[in-house]
Amino acid sequence: MTIFWRDAMSVGVAELDADHKKLIALLNHAEKAVAQSDHNILRVVLQELVAYVDYHFRREEAVLRAVEFPTFAEHKKAHEQMAQKAILVRDKYLSATTPDEKAKYAAVVPRLLNDWLINHIFKEDMKLKPYARIMIKRDDPGAGLEAVSAPPKRVEKNKDIEYKVPPHLEHLLKRIEYVAPEPPPATGDFKSFDDLCAAAVNQRIDRVLVFFQRRNPGVERKLPPVFLASDEFAKKFHLAVAKFIVPAIKESRQVRLLATNFDWASADSESFWDFVTPQLKDNILETWMHAWDEMKLVEVRKEDGTRVLQVKEPTKQLREMLAPSTPEAYDLPRVSNREIEVFKSLLDPVNDWWGRLNLVWQTCHDLYEQEKDPRVFQQQAREGALRDGLLNAFTNFPEKWGDFLVLTCHRVFPRVTTQFLESFSRNIGRNEAEREGYMPYLIRYLRQAREDPGIARREEELENLWMAQEKELRTFLKNNPPQ
C-alpha cells in the first residue's frame, strides 16, 4: 500500500517533516522491492534505513530538548527500541542464506516500517505539534539540526489562541481532547517458548482492546460502555485466556513441533510475530480458534422434541470470570456463541491491527471535526461525511468490530449522540432485526437508550445550547476579527 504525504501528518517543524517524508519514501521503496522480490534494492533500503534512523532521531531529540518536552525520556527510549528493531531486521535479512529465509525476513520489513510510521509519527510525534510555536533557533551539528524555526505566520493565524472571545465561548475554539491509551510495551527475557508465546498472544490482543478504550472524560454518557471499551474487561479477558486458551496452545503437538526450530530466546513479545514461520502462526491461530469453539453452546434436543442450547461447564466459568464488578463498569451480554466469535476475532497473528485502526480513527476524527465541530477557520464538511466515513471504515477491518468503532465515536465525540446512532443504524439494514444481525451491540445499546427518555432529552438540550453558542461565536468573530 503506497503511502502519500498529507499536510495532516505535519508535526509543525519543517526539518522533521522532511525526515518523515524520507521515511515514507523508504517504506514505499521497501514495499515495492518486497512485492517484486528485488532483494538487491531491499538490501540497499535496509542499509539506508539503519543509517538514517540515527540521524533523524538525534535531530528530533534536539527539538524535544529545546522545547523541554515533558516526556522526553520516554520518547527517547522509544527511539532506541525502534532503532534496535531496525538493526535486528536488517541483520536477520542480511544473514539469510536461502531464498526462503530472505523472503521470510523481507516480508517483515513493510510491516515494521508501516507500524513504525503509523504508531510513532501519527501518534507520538504528533504530541510535539502544540510545542511548535515555541521553537527556538539551534546550532547543533551533532543533532543534525542547523536551525529550527517557528511555523509560518499564516499557519499561526489558524491557532485558536489568536481569537479572543468571551469565556463562555472559548470551548468552541478548542480542539477536542480525549484519553487514548497506548498498548503496553514489549517484554522479553522469557524462560521458555511457552511463556513468550503467551505474552505475544496477550500483546497482540491488547493492541485491539486498548484501541477501543479511548474515552472523553468531558462527555457524559449515562449508559455503561460496551465490554471491549473497558480496561476492567481487558484484565478479566486476559485471565480467561490464560485459564482456558493458553493451555490448549501449549499442549498442541503441532505448535510444539514447529517451535523447536524457532529462535525464541532472541525475540520479545512484539517481535515474536515477525519471526515465527507462517506455518507456526497458522497453527497457533488454529489452536486459538478451536479452543474457543470448544466453549460454544451446543444445541441439544429435549425429550419433548424442543431444541435448546446447552452451556458447558467451562463456559459457565467464563461467564463468571468476565462478569463486570458493577453494572456501570461495562455492558456484556451473557456470554454466548456471538460473544465467543468476537473473542476469537481479537487474535490475528498475521495482521497487527493497531496501526490500521489508528489510521481509520484519524479519518473519523478529522471528519467529525470538519462536519460536526469545525473550527472557525476550517471549511465545513458536507452533512453525512462522518456517517459515510464510518461505513467505509468497516471495509478496512473485521466486521465484528464495527459496533465498537461506532460506539467509541459516541463515547469520545460530544455530538455523536444516540440520535446519530439511530440514524446511522438505518444504513445497515432494512429493519431492526436485520440491523441486529450486522451490529448487535450497537442495537443493544440503542434499545437500552430508548428505555430512558431522559437521555434523548439531555442530548437535545446540549445540542440546542451548542447551536446557540456557535451562532453567537460566529456573530462575535464577524464583528471582532482576529488580530
Image (cartoon, rainbow, N blue to C red):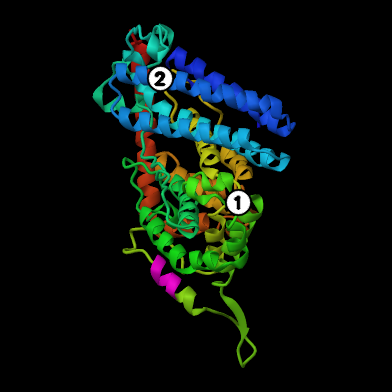
Q: Please provide percent x and percent y for residue 336.
A: 52, 69
Specify whether 323 is left or right of 399: left
Residue indicated by mark 1 = 399
Specify whether 195 is left or right of 135: right
Q: Is residue 377 magenta?
A: no
Q: From this viewpoint, is residue 323 visible?
A: yes
Residue 377 quadrant: top left
Q: Please provide percent x and percent y for residue 106.
A: 65, 36
Relative to 102, say whether 377 is above or below: above
Specify whether 428 is left or right of 195: right
Label 1: element kind: helix
State which region is magenta: 317-322
Q: Please provide percent x and percent y for residue 34.
A: 69, 33
Which image quarter is the N terminus in?
Answer: top right
Relative to 230, say whether 43 is above or below: above
Q: Please provide percent x and percent y for residue 307.
A: 62, 83
Q: CA distance from mark 1 to mark 2?
A: 42 Å
Dot 1, crowdedness within 10 Å: few (<14), some or many (≥20)? some
Residue 180 quadrant: top left
The circle on residue 102 is none
Secondary structure mostly seen in the magenta stretch = helix
Residue indicated by mark 2 = 58
Most extreme residue toward the left is: 167
